[in-house]
Image (cartoon, rainbow, N blue to C red):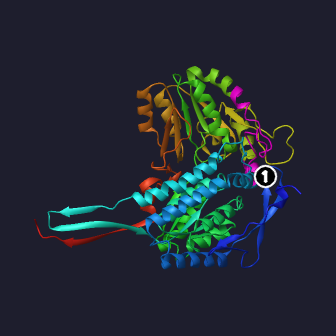
């Protein structure tokens, strides 16, 4: 029997124990590389959400975590980070089975995605311990000091495209500052969260602090958002779902933080270092099969180098050959699901009407099973075309020429989205000019995606509401109060 065939069913984790759904419901977990059912997962409903929120509320009120010394929470989260890294191979195997991301070449230590997940835990564990309060002396007759305390129970709703890393990005600050959480991961990636539950338990986190309910958005996500004991919701996903969440959260005035989609511009000037810019542009749209919110899916190239760029980009893209994601040499796996495959293929049909397919545009030869799509580039499409405006979430880049900086800004800012932007230029003046005028929440200059966790993560327009990262996460996940008393003037 293969390792894939022995995957155990995924279950909810509530109040420190794994359990089935209250009504016994399950759903199939499908391997997107083979289209085969590999196991089942518990299908959460209102009753399961109620149990999880009750457990989280009880744990918060008990105070063993919410009022524990910051040093205890730091020690627990650091131990959890160590345990995550120790189980790196297991986690990555499960993630590859559930969502198709390539497992990648062997690493001397933990896989980079697991290493980053552990970093999330360690960073916020330290931030919450080192963060100080503020005190104000008004005219030497009134002293006021602030207090930032754990706020309560939060609902965390996370996507499938990097299950562990994007989950720890939310739960690390939520838990570090003393809150309890009910986590609803995507139904497309329910497997790897079980390891995280085991890790938190082994690290010594009290029961009920972290809970997981698996299932679909309407059945489990909606009642989580609407539950009266849930203080706030942090969500990563589509703008349409965020608007639905906002409507459900409004009656109880819940806090919300939304990190949504993107149609990010990767702007390449003629004076850029093309030996770095071109491979980075390919990685920016083909990594994870283009299933990334920050993917550079609009590649803007200065007209004077446009033809040369197309030739070089085609050569570089040839290295992104789709294949079995469990093969250590594979760089690009399948899309996550049949629904996502059909969506991307539908956009490729649109692209044939709105522009010209430079390369790719179909199912890779020899891969008759699995939700595979070739790395694809579209040219000769208007910046206003659907293919240039709508988020595809697949390995499909639209390459658009521009004349000068102002023309590039006009094209780049002509979007309902505003999550990320990339600028490649040898001119500091150009980089400065562009970064101040590009309508995005995050901008990288002469580099691909690279993070400092102290920086604000989030977008503008349809790409999100709110910011997370560093002290901004602390503001979202804590309640700040002040105490004031009179002084005798010196």
Q: Going by the image, does 202 lie left or right of 348? A: left
Q: Nearer the viewer, residue 234 or 451?
A: 451
Residue 338 belongs to magenta span: yes
Q: Going by the image, does 3 lie left or right of 286? A: right
Tell me how many marks there are. 1
Q: Residue furthest left?
A: 490
Is 366 located above or below residue 236 in the figure? above
**Residue 356, image x, y percentages:** 71, 32
Q: Going by the image, does 398 lie left or right of 267? A: right
Q: Quadrant of the C terminus?
A: bottom left
Q: Nearer the viewer, residue 239 or 355?
A: 239
Is 171 located above or below residue 291 in the figure? below
Residue 194 belongs to magenta span: no
SS class of the residue under badge 1? Answer: loop
Which residue sits at x=59%, y=74%?
Answer: 207
In terms of image quadrants, where is residue 131?
Answer: bottom left
Which residue sits at x=58%, y=77%?
Answer: 55
Q: Which residue is mark 1?
A: 32
**Residue 375, image x, y percentages:** 73, 37
**Residue 181, image x, y percentages:** 55, 69
In terms of image quadrants, where is residue 240?
Answer: bottom right
**Residue 236, image x, y percentages:** 58, 57
Q: Tell me the crowding category of disc 1: few under 14, some 14 to 19, or many 20 or more residues within 10 angstroms, Cα based.
A: many
Is 335 located above or below residue 400 in the figure? below
Which residue sits at x=50%, y=79%?
Answer: 62
Q: Nearer the viewer, residue 91 or 244?
A: 91
Q: Please state the extent of the stretch shown in magenta in the rendering.
A: 314-343
Residue 343 visible from this viewpoint:
yes
Q: Quadrant of the N terminus?
A: bottom right
Which residue sits at x=49%, y=54%?
Answer: 123
């Amino acid at each position: 029997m293969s390792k894939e065939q022995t995957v155990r069913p995924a279950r909810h984790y509530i109040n420190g124990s794994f359990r089935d759904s209250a009504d016994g419901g399950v759903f199939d977990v499908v391997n997107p590389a083979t289209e085969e059912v590999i196991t089942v997962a518990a299908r959460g409903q209102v009753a399961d959400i109620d149990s999880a929120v009750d457990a989280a509320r009880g744990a918060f009120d008990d105070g063993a975590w919410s009022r524990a010394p910051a040093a205890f929470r730091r020690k627990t989260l650091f131990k959890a980070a160590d345990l995550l890294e120790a189980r790196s191979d297991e986690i990555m195997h499960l993630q590859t089975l559930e969502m198709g991301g390539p497992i990648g070449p062997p690493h001397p230590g933990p896989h980079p995605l697991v290493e980053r997940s552990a970093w999330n835990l360690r960073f916020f564990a330290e931030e919450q311990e080192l963060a100080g309060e503020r005190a104000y002396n008004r005219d030497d007759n009134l002293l006021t000091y602030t207090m930032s305390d754990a706020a309560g129970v939060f609902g965390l709703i996370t996507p499938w495209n990097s299950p562990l890393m994007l989950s720890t990005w939310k739960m690390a600050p939520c838990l570090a500052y003393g809150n309890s959480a009910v986590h609803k991961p995507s139904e497309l990636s329910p497997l790897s969260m079980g390891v995280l539950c085991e890790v938190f338990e082994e690290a010594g986190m009290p029961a009920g602090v972290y809970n997981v309910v698996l299932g679909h958005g309407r059945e489990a996500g909606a009642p989580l958002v609407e539950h009266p004991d849930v203080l706030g919701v942090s969500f990563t996903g589509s703008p349409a779902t965020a608007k639905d969440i906002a409507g459900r959260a409004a009656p109880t005035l819940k806090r919300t933080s939304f990190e949504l989609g993107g149609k990010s511009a990767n702007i390449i000037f003629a004076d850029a270092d093309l030996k770095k810019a071109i491979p980075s542009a390919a990685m920016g749209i083909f990594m994870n099969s283009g299933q990334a919110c920050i993917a550079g899916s609009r590649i803007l190239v200065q007209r004077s180098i446009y033809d040369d760029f197309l030739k070089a980009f085609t050569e570089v893209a040839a290295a992104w050959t789709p294949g079995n994601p469990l093969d250590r040499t594979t760089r690009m796996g399948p899309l996550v699901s049949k629904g996502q495959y059909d969506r991307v293929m539908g956009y490729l049909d649109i692209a044939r009407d709105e522009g010209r397919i430079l390369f790719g545009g179909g199912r890779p030869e020899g891969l008759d099973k699995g939700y595979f799509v070739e790395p694809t580039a579209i040219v000769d499409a208007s910046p206003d075309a659907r293919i240039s405006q709508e988020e595809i979430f697949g390995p499909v880049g639209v390459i658009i020429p521009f004349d000068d900086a102002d023309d590039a800004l006009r094209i780049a800012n002509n979007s309902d989205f505003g999550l990320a932007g990339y600028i490649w230029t040898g001119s500091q003046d150009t980089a400065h000019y562009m970064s101040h005028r590009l309508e995005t929440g995050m901008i990288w200059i002469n580099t691909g995606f690279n993070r400092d966790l102290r920086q604000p993560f989030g977008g503008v327009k349809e790409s999100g509401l709110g910011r997370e990262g560093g002290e901004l996460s602390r503001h979202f996940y804590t309640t700040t109060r002040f105490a004031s008393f009179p002084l005798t003037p010196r």
